[in-house]
Amino acid sequence: MSESIGYDQTALRNAVDVAAAARRLRHLGRERSLAAVSERAWLLESLGRLDEALAAATEAVGLARASGSRDRVAEARLLRASVVQTRGDLATALRDCTAIIAESRSNDWVELWAHALQQRGTVHFALGQWHEACVDFTVAVELCREAELDASQLEAAEVALLVATDRAQTEALRAEQDVPRASHPIWGGR
């Protein structure tokens, strides 16, 4: 999407050009195709209009169900999970992403599987579950490479893995420094 201007390494999400996103949103109007409603939900989420984004994402799930395509339903559910995560309901987002990962894996929908792993990794990251985030990002990177998926998806997964690994190492060092050291009663020290 042309509204995307890079990858925000603090939120582990696409950064957007706010003006371009608002223009695109106006251009979409009230178009009701699954693609338009899904894009509207993503744009609204990107602009921080989360109640409207959730309504659009829920509408996208309904439209996908009407299409009869199970993979499209899973994609729309993942979009809704992203909005739910942005709204702060991390437990629900984690549960939804985990279900989509299982479904994608069992149906060999590799691109969706990788995307769902990356999304769940961002939920783990938001929860401070560094190890779990690293595992999800690592598998997402491997899937992107093996299936030769879109370069931007691979890059986002690699950046997320680097950021999560750095955070995990930083937190491990911090925890190690906070542990009181035993000292010898006569000589002190360790």
Image (cartoon, grey):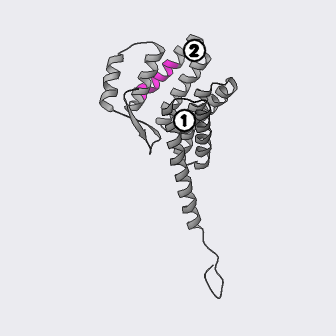
The kind of secondary structure element at disc 2 is: helix
Mark 1, residues whose alpha carbon is within 10 Å: few (<14), some, or many (≥20)? many
Residue 144 pos. (x, y %): 58, 33
Q: Is residue 153 magenta?
A: no
The residue drawn where x is 42% and y is 30% is: 45
Relative placement, left or right, of 12 versus 30 is right
Q: Quadrant of residue 96?
A: top right
Foreground residue, 140 or 58?
140
Residue at numbered disc 2: 65
Q: Is residue 178 above or below residue 1?
A: below
- Of all residues, the one furthest to the bottom in this rendering is 186
Specify start and end residues of the magenta stretch as a single range. Answer: 50-60
Amino acid type of the residue tagged 2 in the rendering = Arg
- The residue located at (45%, 12%) in the rendering is 33
State whether the magenta stretch is mostly helix, strand or loop: helix
| Observer-nearest of 63 and 21 | 21
Is tag 2's residue or tag 1's residue first in the polypeptide sequence?
2
What is the CA distance from the residue labelled 2 to the residue labelled 1?
A: 21 Å
Q: Is residue 59 magenta?
A: yes
Q: Which mark is residue 119?
A: 1
Locate residue 91: give its quadrant.
Answer: top right
